[in-house]
Amino acid sequence: MGFSLLLRRQATYYFRRAVPVALRPIIGQREILVSLRTKDLWEAKSRAAQEAVKADRLLWQARQTLQNPSAAVHAVAQELVREDAQARLGRLQDDEEVEAESMALLGELERLAGK
């Protein structure tokens, strides 16, 4: 891997990768920029390799979304339900809180289905 994906600001290294124009509406940003939280070049290279794998996965998922939007909406819906279930474990909610969360989830699903 070339290390042109490394950016140094002040003394700290960052991982930076441009997001292709076609994927920007899905990802929501022009570039992926992550602080590697190190001043050491060799440590930055190691961490940049790990971030490159994460970025590749994110870009791959965005490409899959372009090819099959309905499957992407289903996957996001499943993730939202899973996160919601984890957050609710061991906690009771009042009616207003349940209604607000339901409306937020419904709005997010409608937004995703509209893309």
Image: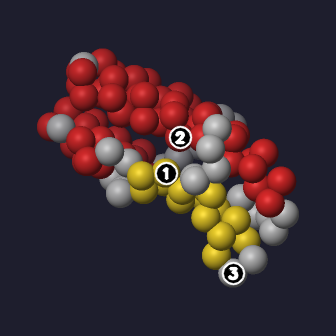
Q: For mark 1, what is the residue?
A: 17
Q: Amino acid at mark 3?
A: Gln
Label 1 SS: strand
> Is disc 2 surrounded by few (<14), some (14 to 19) or many (20+) residues within 10 Å?
some
Q: Are marks 3 and 2 in contact (CB under 8 Å)?
A: no
x then y, percent, for residue 24: 29, 48
- Give the mark toward the camera: 3 or 2: 3
x then y, percent, for residue 71: 30, 18
Q: Which mark is residue 76?
A: none
In the image, taking residue 16 as reference, residue 23 lies left or right, namely left
- Give the mark toward the camera: 2 or 1: 1
Identified at 76% across, 64% down, the residue is: 37
Q: Quadrant of residue 51?
A: top right
Given residues 53 and 114, the one toward you in this image is: 53
In the image, taking residue 74 as reference, residue 37 lies left or right, namely right
Q: Amino acid at mark 2?
A: Ala
Identified at 73% across, 71% down, the residue is: 12
Q: CA distance from mark 2 to mark 1?
A: 8 Å
* N-terminal label among 3 and 1: 3
